[in-house]
Image (spheres, rainbow, N blue to C red):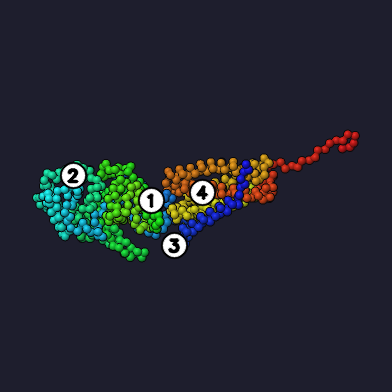
Amino acid sequence: MASRRPRPGRHLIVFFLGLAVLYGLTALSQAGVKDPETPWRPALGLDLQGGTRITLTAEKAPTKENLDEARRIIDQRVNGSGVAEAAVTTQGGRNIVVEVPGKTQNRDQLEETVKRQAQLRFRLVACSDIRPAGCESSTPGGMGLGRAPLSLAEDDPTDGATDGATDSATDSATDAATDSPATDASTDGSTDAPADAPTDAPSDAPTGAPTAEDPAGDGAKWTVADDIAWSRSPDQAAIALYNGYTCDAKGVVVDADGKPADQVDDPDQPLVACTEPERDAEGNEETPPIKFLLSRSVVEGTELDDASAQTPQNGVGWVVAIEMGNSKERAHPKGSAGAASDFEAVTRAFAGTDEQFAVVLDGQVLTYPVLNSVITDGRSQIEGDFSEQEALDLANSLKFGALPIKFNDQQTSVEEIGPSLAGNQLSAGLTAGAIGLILVMLYCLFYYRGLGLVVVSSLFVAAAVTYAMVLLLSKTAGFTLTLPGIAGLIIAVGITADSFVIFFERIRDEMREGKSMRVAVETGWARARVTRIAANTVQILSALVLYIFATGAVKGFGFALGLTTLIDLAVLFWFTKPMVSWLAQFKAFNSGHKLSGLSKETLGMDITPSRPRRTAVAGGDA
C-alpha cells in the first residue's frame, strides 16, 4: 500500500488560521482594557510593576496555627488560578500582609475577597419584608426551638401547659418588639415569665435539657423535617428577634439604636439577616435591603465538594455552581445523611410552593429563590447578579474554605506599592532575551544556511504564539509576568533551537546514506519526533513539579517554562516540519545546492571527482 503523500501547504494554512484565531481572541480580551497606556501589554508582577498591599489585623490574638492557616487560605484565594503571583505573608502575631500585582480598579472588592469569612449556609425562610405572614404576631401552636415539632404540638391544642407557654412567649415577644432590642427581649422573656412558664409544664411535656445533639430535649435528634416545620411556624422568641431588628442602608442588621445587631451566625440557631441593596449601573439604589427571619442551617459551606464560576446554560451573566456531597458527615446534627440528602428533603417540601430558602454568606443573604423542581444530585447554582470577577472571587472563597480568624475592619489598611526591583531590571531581562535570540539565529544561518531560514521563521512564530498566550492568560487567568517568568521564556529559545538541531541532523544523516531530501525529511522526522517528544516530556514534568510544589516567583517560572515547552511542540509539529517538507519540493533544496545547507560538502560527503584509469599498451608508448 502506498504511503499517504504529505501535504505541507495544507498544514501551514491551518496553522496560520489557528494563529489568526488566537490573536482574534487576544484582541477580544484587550477590548476591555481602559488604560490607553497598557493595551497589548502583559500584566507585570510585583517585582516589575508594584501593586496593592492590604494589611489585615486579627481582632484577637490568634494562635500561630490559626494565623498560618488563614495565610494559606488567603493565598489560595488571591492565587486561585495559580499564576497571579500575589504575595501573602504573616507579620508579627496578628497581621497578614497581602500584596497583589498591578493596579486594582476595585480595591474594596479585593479587600472583601481577602478578608471574607466565607461561612456559607443554606437556611429556610420563615418570613421576610416581602412575605411578612407568620412574623407579624403570635402564632398559636407555634413550635419553639428546643421543642417538639409542630405536628406533635397540634396533637394536644388544649393542653394548659401549652397555652401558658404560648401566652408567656407572646407577652415577652410583644414587650421586646416595643420596648427593647431583640437580644434584651429574649433575656427579659426568660426572667420575667410568670409561674406557669414552660419550665413548670406538666410531665407530658418534654423534660430533657436541649443540647446540640438533642435540640428538642426529648431524646430525639433534630432533623431537616424539624427545620421545615419550624420555618412554617417559627417560635415567639425568634419572632421577637426579627421584629427587634431592622436593615440599614448597606444591608447590615441593626438594633433600635442603629447599632450593629449583637447576634452570632450560629448554625444551630435562627438568624435575622438582610440582603444588600440592589443598584443600577450608575450606583443608584433600585431595591432597598430586605430583612429575613431564617431557620437553623440545613446545609453548611464545609459540606460543598466543589464551587466554580460559570455562565448558565441558555442564559447570560455569571453564577456560582456548587456541588454537595453525602460523603462528609455534618458537623451538626450528628448522624445526618449528608448535605445532598438534606437539600433534597428541602426541595421536595418546597417545590411548587412559594416557600423559599436563603443562601447566606457571612451573615448576609445572597439570594432567596423558590424551588420549581426537586434537586436530587446536590448540584445547584447561586445566582446574585454577579460580575465575572465577583463570581470567581466567591467561588474561590467557597472552594478554599473559611478563615479561622476574624479581622478588625478599622485596622485594615490598603495602599499602593512600587516595584521591588529597579526599573532597569525589566529592560535588562528583555535585552538579554533579544541578544540570545539573535545569536541563535546567526549561528543557525551560518551552520544550516538555507535551512536556517526555517529556524528563524520558527523562532518568530514561536515568539508570536508566546506573546499572544501571555496576553490572553493575563486577562483570563490573571497571569503576571515576573523576572523569573521572563527567564523561563528566554530558556524556551534554547529548547526550540534544540528541536531544530535534532530534526535537521536526522535529515542530514539520511541524506548521507544517499536518500533524496523528500525521503530524508519523512524518515528523519519519524526518528526525530520520538526523541523530541521524550525530551519535552521530561521538560514539562520538571515544570509541573515546580508549579505544584513551589511558591511565589518559582511557581511563575515553572508555569512559563511549561507553557513555552508546549508551544515548542506545537510549532515543531505544525509549522517547522510542514515548512521543511514544503522546501523539499524545490529543486534548490532537493538537489543539494550549496546555499541550501544540504550540499555534499556541507554533509561531509566525499566530493573528489574520480579519474579514469590509465593502462599500458604492449609494444608501444603509453
Quick one: 119 or 409, which is closer to the camera?
119
Name which of mark 2 and mark 4 comes first in the sequence: 2
Split into 4 quadrants, where in the image is the N terminus? Answer: top right
Q: Is residue 115 left or right of residue 473?
A: left
Q: Residue under label 4, please give it.
A: 564
How far, Cα to Cα, is label 1 from label 2?
40 Å
Q: Amino acid at mark 1?
A: Ser
Give SS at disc 2: loop
* Disc number lying in front (3 or 2): 2
Q: Residue under label 1, please give it.
A: 308
* Disc number lying in front (3 or 1): 1
Q: Residue under label 3, please give it.
A: 34
Q: Residue under label 2, please give it.
A: 217
How far, Cα to Cα, is label 2 from label 4?
65 Å
How far, Cα to Cα, is label 3 from label 1?
27 Å
Name which of mark 1 and mark 2 comes first in the sequence: 2
